[in-house]
Image: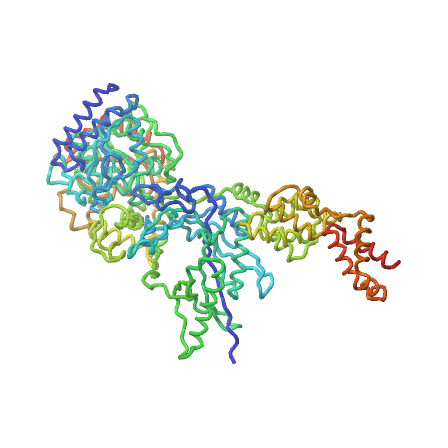
Amino acid sequence: MPAPWETVIGLETHVQLRTVSKMFCGCSAAFGAPPNTNVCPVCLGLPGALPVPNELAVKLAVRAALALGCTVHPRSVFARKNYFYPDLPKGYQISQFEQPLATDGSLSYLSPERGIVTATIVRLHLEEDAGKSLHDRFPKQTAIDLNRCGVPLIEIVTGPDFRSPQEARAYLLTLKQVLEYAGASDCDMEKGSLRVDANVSVRRAGDTALGTKVEVKNINSFAYVEKALTVERDRQIAVLEGDGGARGAIEQQTMLYDAKTNSVRPQRTKEESHDYRYFPDPDLPPLVLQPEFIEEQRAALPELPTAKRERFQTQYALSIEHAAVLTSDRTVADYYEAAVHAGAEPKVAANWVINEVLADAKDHNEQLRVPAASLAQLVSMVKGGRLSQQAAKRVFVEVAERGGEPRNVAEALGLIQVADSGVVAAWVSEVLGAHATEVSRYRNGETKLLQFFVGQVMKASRGKADPKLAQKVLEDKLAS
Amino acid sequence: MNDPSEALASAKAAADRVVKTKRLNACLTGPKDLRKSLVAQAQAAHPSGVLYGMPVAVKDNIATLDFPTTCGSKILEGYRSPYEATAVVKLRAAGALITGKTNCDEFAMGSSTEHSAYGRTLHPFDKTRVPGGSSGGSAALVAAGVVPAALGSETGGSVRQPASLCGVVGIKPTYGRVSRYGLVAFGSSLDQIGVLGRSVHDAARVLSVISGRDPKDSTCEDRDPLRLPTVPESLQGFVIGIPKEYFPADLDPAVRRACDRVIRLFREQGAAVREVSLPHTSFAVATYYILAPAEASSNLARYDGARYGPRFDGATDVRALYRATRGQGFGAEVRRRILIGTYVLSSGYYDAYYRKAQQMRALIAQDFRNAFDRGVDLLFTPTTPTAAFKAGEKLADPVAMYLSDIFTVTANLAGLPAISLPIGRAKGLPLGGQFIGQAFLEDELIEAAYALERVVPATTEA
């Protein structure tokens, strides 16, 4: 019996940098403008126009490279990638080839199968985006929108390091996290600011040589990454095992993923038989970065997710899972720390953020609607016994919806717990009087009924009684 | 001149001269359009500008708002640029009048102005001969006295070679001295806008205006505009190198006699003359004809009929559209160079051709540095191997045509400034000699040219 199949995946990720203007001209890089309005002679490739590099794009690319542990090269070279396509107005794309901006980085991520593993970043280079061809706008015609043409991108290439589609997805989510932290990109796959091409091959476990790779393109959403790669992996295994026929061989080709049918189909070979004829772009001098410039970019980087997660674990005594959730997004991490600094007990605050704040954000366009200071106040009120956990959740929702100080809101809703033993004793007497049968059962040894009495007191007090106090008073009275 | 009526008169007179010399086919702008534009320009020009009222013609591969920019190609027939080249913007700011667009070899690829989709330009002294190229239209207009100066462009000698053949002055500045923004690219690492002028002074003052930094061109040096030197008394103090590789045994005798006469004048004028060697010179033309076509094959990819320019239709899909447009829109010489360039960049050939040529280019540049490091200020050589040749003579033999740039391509490969000026005649046809200078020392070059211009018998037989 042959060894089981092993999947080998490498990823090439294109990430749009978060700049105001394009890579080589002053046009807006914003998404969603009316077609062909963010254009000028440079990004239209008009005769005689010349590119000038965008400094912010270089800064963001260097920050991304440093965040991924890459070596940033003091001298890199822009190169032309030549091919004909109607949405590529110059007939070439300005990219980097032989001498990229950065190489030799790595990114650790949590593999669902192997725990924490490290993917190698082979290279990271700067380039410009092409325009968009719209094939479905007008019947039998292709429309070209050149707004995207010249938008700055970085391409991040990994080694063949992933052993499953799930790992590829986990890596991508981690990559997105790091790039968002670094402020390099908003990584919005739906807007096309993060795009993935994958190289997929399979081999028998234990083999050291790689199988023939197939490139999978057109994976347009995080949700499709696993699906697309699984479909291609299964296709390759079926070919190699001779599913319903003779055993076949894998052909090196490019496949396009179709999310509607969850299937892959080969790109027309004509389109992919490119010889890009890369050569250094004579319009652009080599990109020379001074060591001080690189260090400035390093200094501009915030604490990155892994470092932050580890700090949260030790500083706030959180579990790895809680720390990971809280640091997955920089805004959430900052929010959590603000709540702690405002006086919330760290572990309790972590539970609140994970269970209430994030759930609320998910339903409300990722807005953290309750200010961190208010959350801290809420947490303290629960701890001080002035608000029950249940009541606090009501106050949280109220503050989220209508704002206001939690203290005032709780008071207005009449949710402040009564910790006056005299008042509580009155509710206890009322409850014991109304449930004589249960009282005698309790006194005959059925002590688990205590919780029933507590519930009744809470009901009688309409939630206002401090449950701990109520229990204590109940125990005293029932014992006498 | 700083009187608007004089500017207007100058504009009208220039337009009249263009009409009178129409038979040369040097100016591509129609008389009506030209007159209308010139009158408007004269009225709008800044009287304080240093070139106020000066008519300056512009090669058709430099973008202008007033006239189409066709690069002498059918593929850009009628194309109007929505923006203007930095050099032209600076000319206008100095008060110059843009006196039409001049004919050229298609996309500046050629040495005779025969490779224009709009017909060949005639040599102003002999209509059976070529004016040189690719800036042949600019050279012919200056030589015919239509304009005192014109913009041209150089990739391998396209300003100096026609200047030499037409008996005018041609300056190619250091690479990076003049912005290329708006110069339609041929070989971007070699291309520079240059100036053709009636005299050294006319050429130099236009160069001074168009030179200097431009944030729109990353390859343009961050330097102030060139300051014009004063005319020197003599060549006292100059060390002039004579590179022996530029004087082969089979050099045209008239060219040799004219150069020898100049060298005697150098000594009379107090210059020290030294023979020097630039040992890699013989590889220059081969190197050039790999690098320039390589860059051209990429630079010209944008002319595909999809966005602007005429579309040669009947195509059912986009590949067919490209084939039809590029097949019919480009002339034979342009197609030849695109093919050469595509070949030398192809995988499997890149190392053998493109990379080798880049290495050779570095050696050629090093040759010049070595000569200058040994105390030579300037080099002097013939500009062209012969006087103007007959139309059609080299059309069937591209290599013979390419060899007419043999003395000029080196300065482009090395990025150095050079100036060609008339140094005599051969059977009535002008001969040119050139100074090649050190990077960004155009002032020395112009100084020496001033001194030589004053004493050289430019119109007598050599």
Q: Residue at x 36, y 34 (%)?
A: B440
Instruction: Provide residue B20's location: percent of width, then percent of height.
Output: 12, 31
Check the image and name the residue furthest to the right: A480
* Residue B91 visible here: yes
Rendered view: B415 above or below B3: below
Rendered view: B111 above or below A98: above
Quadrant location of the C terminus of chain A?
bottom right
Query: B436 or A51, which lies in front?
Result: A51
The mark total stands at 0
Q: Residue at x 47, y 42 (%)?
A: A56
Instruction: Provide residue B194's location: percent of width, then percent of height.
Output: 28, 35
**Left or right, residue B50 beside residue A430:** left
Query: B176 or A139, which lies in front?
Result: A139
Instruction: Provide residue A80's location: percent of width, then percent of height.
Output: 37, 50
Q: Quadrant of residue A231?
A: bottom left
**Left or right, residue A331 beside residue B160:** right
Q: Quadrant of residue B372?
A: top left
Query: A45 or A30, which lies in front?
Result: A30
* Residue B355 visible here: no
Rendered view: B401 above or below B179: below
Q: Residue at x 28, y 45 (%)?
A: B186
Query: B214 or A193, which lies in front?
Result: A193
Instruction: Provide residue B165's location: percent of width, then percent of height.
Output: 18, 37
Check the image and name the residue furthest to the top: B3
**Left or right, residue A351 beside residue A155:** right
How does the figure colour the protein chain or chains? Answer: rainbow
